Image (spheres, rainbow, N blue to C red):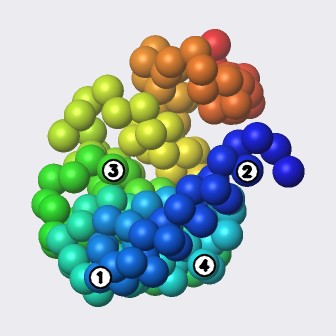
């Protein structure tokens, strides 16, 4: 068990104590869900996030975590519903919009994923996750604009995104781009 795993396990225990004192504390349910997600305990995360949303259905981070947990569990159709419900509670939320786009890509709905990314990019034209997801969706659709989309991603991607940058460079090479 790494130090990070130990830290998140401690956080789960801390939230468990807080919830024993006040089981209606939606923020504690959300915090517990976040720690469980970081521990890759997605089914447990989903249970906690559902409790948070039952107490506060407008809790945007809970909708984000619900969509991500369902996606991690391979429950893509349910994840899409979660992103849509979150966007109904918080229209224009960039993180929810990008999560929705990624789930559409997972569902093989490439054109819908590109359109969802375009809506996210209207909110923030330099959104790195939206640019990356858009490039992947264009590639999956065999769209001729995929290379330009990967180049656009590479132009703004921060150096700490090593794996995504390497992936984009490899895709460009495969596409015959620079």
* Discs 4/1, front: 1
* Position of 73 relative to 141 (above/below): below
Please give left or right for residue 93 compared with residue 49 in the image.
Answer: left
Q: Position of residue 144 (x, y in %)?
A: 50, 38
Instruction: Give the CA distance from mark 3 to mark 2.
Output: 25 Å
Q: Is residue 50 above or below residue 98?
A: below
Please tell me how crowded label 1 is: few (under 14), some (14-19), or many (20+) other residues with Cα within 10 Å.
some
Residue matched to label 3: 95
Disc 4: which residue = 44
Task: Report whether 97 appears left or right of 67.
Answer: left
Residue lying at 42% horizontally and 32% vertically, measured from the top left = 128
- The tag earlier along the polypeptide, 4 or 1, is 1
In screen coordinates, is 87 left or right of 146? left
Residues at marks 2 and 1, CA–CA distance in whole angstroms: 26 Å
**Contact between labelled residues 2 and 3, with CB atoms less than 8 Å apart:** no
Q: Which one is closest to the eye, mark 3 or mark 1?
A: 1
Q: Are marks 3 and 1 in contact (CB under 8 Å)?
A: no
Is residue 115 visible from the viewing direction of this image? no
Please give left or right for residue 175 compared with residue 49 in the image.
Answer: right
User: In the rendered image of this protein, does residue 34 appear above or below residue 148?
Assistant: below
Q: Which x, y percent locates residue 14?
A: 53, 62
Instruction: Mark 2 or mark 4: name the one nearer the start of the chain.
Output: 2
- The answer to whether the residues at label 2 and label 1 have Cβ atoms under 8 Å apart is no
What numbered label is drawn on residue 32? none
Residue, disc 2: 5
Mark 2, Cα crowd under 10 Å, few <14 / some 14-19 / many 20+, is some
Disc 1 marks which residue?
24
Circles 4 and 3, Cβ within 8 Å, touching? The answer is no
- Labels 3 and 2: the sequence-earlier one: 2
At which x and y percent is residue 63? 34, 68
Instruction: Report x, y in % for residue 45.
Output: 55, 73
């Amino acid at each position: 068990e790494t130090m990070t795993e130990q830290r998140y396990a401690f956080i789960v225990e801390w939230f468990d104590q807080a919830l024993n004192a006040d089981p209606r504390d939606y923020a504690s349910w959300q915090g517990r869900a976040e720690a469980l997600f970081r521990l890759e305990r997605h089914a447990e995360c989903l249970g906690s996030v559902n409790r948070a949303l039952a107490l506060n259905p407008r809790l945007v981070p809970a909708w984000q975590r619900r969509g991500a947990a369902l996606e991690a569990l391979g429950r893509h159709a349910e994840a899409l519903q979660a992103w849509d419900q979150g966007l109904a509670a918080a229209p224009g939320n960039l993180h929810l919009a990008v999560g929705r786009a990624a789930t559409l890509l997972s569902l093989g709905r490439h054109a819908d994923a590109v359109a969802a990314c375009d809506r996210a990019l209207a909110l923030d034209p330099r959104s790195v996750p939206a640019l990356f997801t858009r490039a992947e969706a264009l590639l999956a659709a065999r769209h001729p604009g995929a290379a330009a989309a990967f180049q656009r991603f590479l132009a703004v991607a921060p150096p700490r995104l090593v794996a995504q940058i390497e992936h984009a460079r490899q895709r460009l090479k495969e596409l015959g781009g620079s």
